[in-house]
Image (spheres, rainbow, N blue to C red):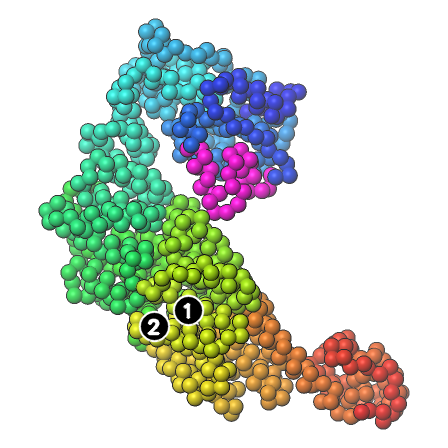
Amino acid sequence: MLDPPGHSSMATVTHHVSTAYGREANVRRVGCLPEAAGTEHAVLRRLLGVPPAGHGARYAPHTVICGLLARGPLVLAIGDAQWCDEGTLRFIDELMRSSHRELLTVLLHLPRGVPTPAAAAFHELATRDYCTVVDSGSPRPAGTTAPASPDVAELARREPRLLAVARAAAALHSTEPDLVGALAGLPSQTADRLLEEAGTRGLLPGPLPAHGTRLLWDTLSESERQRWYAQAAEILNDAAAPVEQVADLLLEQSRLDRPWMRTVLREAAAAARHHRPAAAVAYLARLHAADTEDAPVRLDLAEALVDIDPSAARGHLVHLADAPPGTADRLVREHAAGLLLLVALMLHESPDGPAALGTLLRRTAAGGPEVPPAGPTARDTGTAPAAGRASSTPAPATPLSVTARDLTRPTEHLVLAARALRTALTADGHEAREAAVADARRVIWSGRPHTAWAVVAAARVLTLADDTATALDHLQRIVADSAEREELWAESHAASVHAQVLVEAGRAAEAAEAAAAASRLAETEGATAASPLATIALVRALVARGDLDRAQEALRRIDGRRLDDCVWEHHHHLTALALFERGRGRPEQALRLLERCGASLDAAGVRNPVFTLWWLHSTELLMLLDRPGDAARRAEYGQELAERWLTPRSMGLGLLARGMAAGPRDRVELFAESARVLAQSSDRHAHALAELHLGKELLRRSDRGAQPRLRAALATAARCGLVTVADEARRALRSAADRHAPAALSQAERPVAELAAAGKSNRAIADTLCLTARTVEYHLTNVYRKLGVTGRAGLTKWFAAHRSQPASARAPGGVS
């Protein structure tokens, strides 16, 4: 909307809102500020009063809008729109596209003479079919006059055709003469003329409606109004309008008494399932309400709810799985029973260890003795369509259909992911690792629809297999996609695992930030009770960063939670507690927690060496507590585990543990090989530790190679935010520097070094010490090499750091 000359932006908005809407509509107005133009959702927060930060702020505007619309017509008026931020503009675009049935108007005011906004979202808005540019000198589009408040009863008596056209346009949400004429029972030419008149008199739901369109239905009963909407839906369906637009009209029908209505809702649900899952749930819920005995619809509804609200999905699945024979197709019941087991895993209502996963896989194998092996040899089984399902809807396949081309329903992905997890946790050799990775990659790369749980489980397997880059990439995509689709449970779950994977990769700085965000997300969405994994990841990251006070605060959030049945949460929690206790200087308590973790994993059948690294941490603690025999046995146990799961990370960690427990003669070789192997892995923390241990061992031997290794450990640790490792590396480097103090220099080299550090030139040093310039150069070269410095500036800093005052002049022979 453009204003007339001489008017301020907000004055124009206020005037035209009051003129066009009077007191009928609820009006929210705000003026944009230039200083806030780059702040995401700044205008939206001021307009609706929603929270300024946090995950919940994304959903709060929708809640506010729904509440306002429930009370009547709503107008959102924004002045000085040239300064409106892109986040608010994108929200408006989404809002208007999803609220075409509501009495909602958004007014963006642009003062005359200002440059056109550069924001891409503004220009996209201007091209939408629901957007109209008008001159604010008149509250109506060009060529119209100010409307009068209509008396619908009088209009029905005196101008029934005009009222019919207005009602048709309102029901269709269109002013296309052919469509309006078909619904109003008039020729298109007549409809076109009456549409123009209706617009002039303010009867149409245009971009600036003078009156709410609800007035048009005042003289009709509810059944008559529904008949109008049913006919509008049928006309749009015949005109090949988008199926979701037709389905939205059908949602208002109290009865779905025509076969095509159910077909449209089914097709709309299928179309919306992957880009608007909440809309798909609405369509399926309407179908379910119309016929609660339609088992395939109920199954589809449960599947659509899995990532949004698994608890709600569980209720439908329980009903289907427990249905008596004959009330639901056998395949539907079996599919529901299999999906129910997996939903129970998602909700932590059943154990998730290898034994439980094996039982689950057998029970979901449609009566078969075992799920088929991974790879191209998997058996391909066909299935018959479920009874009562429309032919356009795919029939549920049994969980035996796990070849990539058959992954058409979520259960197949879930079963395949569960199988990959079980194989990875048991780690029964090189072939098992390849099979687990193959299953995980088939889930991720299948290109077919699947639930977030399956992709997250596959990412966990790839992380265990040292393919962390791929795992992180897909986890980030799941978080972003779930947020966009408003799949609350899936977003929280994927964000928590994403933080945990960053911890395991040793990227403590990123992990702390991601874990804090995931923890806030879980609390905001009420998902904390479901899984504390984000908080556990936060504890691990904070301990690695040396922030033990905040780690203790995070641990208190988990106190009293029963996690015994959760393999991932329980054992990572024990490991986090142990590392915290060690950081507090309580190695005995830390060791007891790690021993408990190892015993529990052994009882659960978890043999993967990189699952929690309890054996590596306990090996180091046993050496710290002067129990070398126990440490050696623990290191050998870790090496045996590593040989069952051959990855650079597992093998490098096995070598690192053996190096910790080895005698002085073998440590350097083991640490050096560990550092070499871990450099090829994704675990930056372990690599930094290997370099640190190697550097410290070389330092004990006064080996000149200690400093490069310690500097490598420091660089890796500092880059990844591993504060505790970085601090230890700095201390070791200072010790190395102290060990190579001036006493390590020869009697001939020391005075040369001190005079050079004091700023003397080579000629001045030669004259002072009665040496040739060539001899001075020779001594300085040796000094630089021994002290690990370059040039006089480095030499001066070195002496300053070691509190050794260089002599400004020293008589010949005056060395000490």
Q: Which residue is mark 1?
A: 574
Q: Label the magenta part by its dominant secondary structure.
A: helix
Circle 1 crowding by C-alpha within 10 Å: few under 14, some 14–19, many from 20: many
671 to 680, vertically: above or below: below
605 to 152, vertically: above or below: below
Q: Secondary structure at mark 1?
A: helix
Q: Which residues are magenta?
A: 37-66
Name the one closer to the observer, 345 or 200: 345
Residue 121 lies within the magenta run: no
Q: What's the CA distance linking mark 1 and mark 2?
A: 10 Å
Circle 2 crowding by C-alpha within 10 Å: few under 14, some 14–19, many from 20: some
Name the one closer to the observer, 749 or 60: 60
Residue sitting at 29 percent across and 32 percent down? 251
Name the one closer to the observer, 366 or 559: 559
> In the rendered structure, which amino acid carries the disc numbered 2?
Ser
Residue sitting at 29 percent across and 40 percent down? 269
Q: Secondary structure at mark 2?
A: helix
Residue 393 visible in the shown view: no
33 to 167, vertically: above or below: below
Q: Is residue 314 left or right of residue 192?
A: left
Q: Which residue is mark 2?
A: 600
Q: Return the x and y of residue 491 as percentages of the image width and height.
A: 41, 51
The answer to which of marks 1 and 2 sits earlier in the sequence is: 1
Q: Return the x and y of residue 45 as percentages of the image width and height.
A: 53, 38
Residue 686 visible in the shown view: yes
Quarter of the figure that contains the C terminus: bottom right
